[in-house]
Image: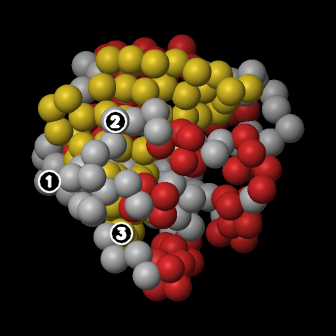
Amino acid sequence: MDDLRFDPAKKDLLDSPDRRKLLPPEKLLSMLPIKNNHVILDLGAGTGYFAIPAAQLTRETVFALDIEPELLADLKAKMEEQNIPNIELLESSVTNIPLPDHSVDCVIASLVLHAIKPLSLGIAEIKRVMKDEGYLLCFDWEHKESPIGPPMNIRVSSSEMEEELNKAGLSITKRLSPTDFLYIFVVQK
């Protein structure tokens, strides 16, 4: 089991104007029923694209998990610069989330699950940390050629993702396709 890694040299892509136009974080977060007492987990948090806006929606902790220490260091600098006290950094992989069972209300998996091998292990770990009735916002790359995104051989089609989520006992409550090469699922435990 060897999760694929995002190249920190490409970190400018994580907060680019094109990404904000394609995937506006505040709009996507509004798809989740986030309350001000919810604990949130951002998987593959990178430089804080979702963790920072999520931290404004809750007074509880937003756990920002990433396997790349350089990206987490950038997020830490942003937290200090913007005086954001409720983000906690976790350097780990999606297949080994260092949180207790049933401890998270909402999970964000932004363009990260395609890098988890095997996918079923990552989804099982997400389910483990989610509270009953918890939510997962999952978006990833469709298995179609596109001008941006990872190589085709590591993409996970929406039908394959749906199958893995269903096998894990999770329910997709909403589906969106903002482009023909991206899909978004809102999933409930």
Q: How many numbered marks appear?
A: 3
Give the residue type that dot 3 points to: Ile
Mark 3 vs mark 1, CA separation in Å: 17 Å
Image position of 131 (left or right of 166): left
- Mark 3 element type: strand
| Residue displayed at 43% across by 15% down | 163
| Residue, disc 3 | 87
Numbered tag placed on residue 33 in the rendering: 2
Image position of 37 (left or right of 77): left
Comparing 118 with 176, the one in front is 176
In this rendering, the answer to whether 30 lies above or below 3 is above
**Dots 2, 1 in contact, CB < 8 A:** no
Q: Position of residue 78 (x, y in %)?
A: 53, 78
| Residue displayed at 37% across by 31% down | 120
Mark 2 vs mark 1, CA separation in Å: 22 Å
In this rendering, the answer to whether 137 lies above or below 72 is above
Give the residue type that dot 2 points to: Pro
One can see residue 85 in this view: yes
| Residue, disc 1 | 100
